[in-house]
Amino acid sequence: MSGVGFAAGEWFMLLRHELVLFAASLFLLGAIDEIAIDLTYLWLRLTGRAQTPRVDEAALLSAPLRGRCAVFIPAWREERVIGATVAHALRVWPQGDLRLYVGCYPNDPETMAAAARAASGDPRLRIVVHDAAGPTSKPDCLNLLYRAMAADELAEGQRARMIVLHDAEDMVDRAGLPLLDEALESVDFAQLPVMALPQKGSRWIAGHYTDEFAEAHSRTMVVRSALGIGIPGAGVGCAISRDWLGKLSRRRDDVGPFAAGSLTEDYELGLRLEALGARSRFVRARVTGGRLIATRAYFPDKLKAATQQKARWVHGIAFQGWDRLGWRGGLAARWMMLRDRRGPLAALLLTLAYGLIVVAGLEYLAVAAGLIAPAPLSSGLVTLLWLNLFAVVWRVAARALFTAREFGWAEGALAVPRTVVSNAIAIVAGRRAGIAYLRTLRGGQAIWEKTEHDDHPALTSKRPDLQPA
């Protein structure tokens, strides 16, 4: 090494400098991207295009549905939560034109029994049993429900007007169904906000979902909708026109409209509909009492379950999305696709950033102990680091404000340290998603890993009725 003219310590300092420059530059690009969303959101707010309207809940609830609504709930080993979900939905949605389809498997009698008990003989519940042992996949189960609905339409001589997707643990809002029914008068695909409820027993793991959804479904999705860009389905609280879902099904030889093999069929659904010319909208409204009309749910409260779920999202949206959907649309649409698919790069940069923080701490201790001489950073790099610090403070403050608006200032304050938890989960999930994707490139199959739900008391005996505040 002496021939090169650098001592080992000097090589280390050079490498550190280049890695810091690389990470700080890309983080600044990401910060500019986020600030662009923030400024667009503020402009939409100032011009009145992003205001959350207040609706008369009594008038909304008194109006009959404009046609039959089919709600699809795929379920595999959901006996802990499906009963509360079915009972709650049938209670707060009393409309006679509702049909609740729950997809089950012959080797899961516990889920079937729990759903049937919860319905208490309500004829609006349809339990559809797959002819194959479970689990297959979520899109396969959804296609099963679609075919069952189509068979009912033929038998009863009444065609559905809209299909609403939900998961086995969702707490639907009583105003959600009529609001979606109203939205489909002007669009073909509508998505309600999702609220990840705080959990006292998991302030950090489950809590990071609270912050992420509060920000994304108060800001990002609002911007996306206002710009007229395709809305990705969240898989819950989204309504699709029956006619458009039929078009997708016919493109798949009437096997069903949902993309078999996709790990994020809900996300893909919204973008495929938009590509075919369907109109979509993110529907954000409050009742006069102030309650946000949204789907509420308790997200994973254990680290393993959270990283597993996030890995599936990254794999399906970033890796499969690139392969299956490509790049399409105008500049704004491609911008949103790039944002959707940045998960793997974000995980890599976060890993590098936290590693550099550890190195900086060790270097500081070594300088303080007199073991090495301090290595000053260039003025340009110092400026870049200050810009990054400003961007981090801005982003964390914005997330805290969005969380506080929906859940109070205590949760908003917790959103600040929870950013570290969110980043740590993103790192692990990105690594796991990358490994899973590489496995598929070597001929392996994309494995569908459903989110397991513990027997959490909040999911069973303490389901809120969602009364106005």
Image (cartoon, rainbow, N blue to C red):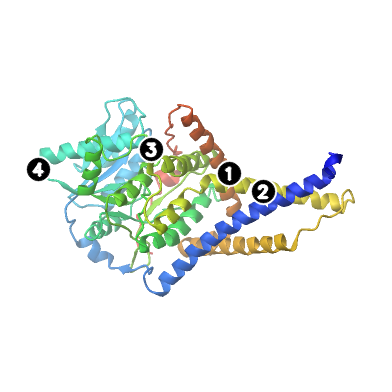
Is disc 1 in contact with disc 2, using a CB cutoff of under 8 Å? yes
Residue 262, numbered circle: 3
Say which of marks 2 and 4 sits in front: 2
- Whole-angstrom CA distance, mark 4 to mark 1, is 52 Å
Q: Amino acid at mark 3?
A: Ser
What residue sits right under mark 1 in the picture?
427
The image quarter containing residue 332 is bottom left
Q: How far across and how far down the image is residue 130, in percent?
A: 27, 29
Q: Residues within 10 Å of mark 4 (few under 14, many from 20)?
A: few
In the image as oriented, which residue stretches furthest toward the right?
370
Q: Secondary structure at mark 1?
A: helix
Specify whether 428 is left or right of 240. right
Q: Secondary structure at mark 3?
A: loop
Q: Who is closer to the viewer here, 164 or 264?
A: 264
Q: CA distance from mark 1 to mark 2?
A: 10 Å
- Give the residue type that dot 2 points to: Tyr
- Determine the CA span between mark 2 and mark 4: 61 Å
Residue depicted at 58% across the width and 64% down the height = 394
The quadrant of the rendering that contains the C terminus is bottom left
Residue 157 — which label?
Answer: 4
**Which numbered disc flags the more N-terminal residue, 2 or 4?**
4
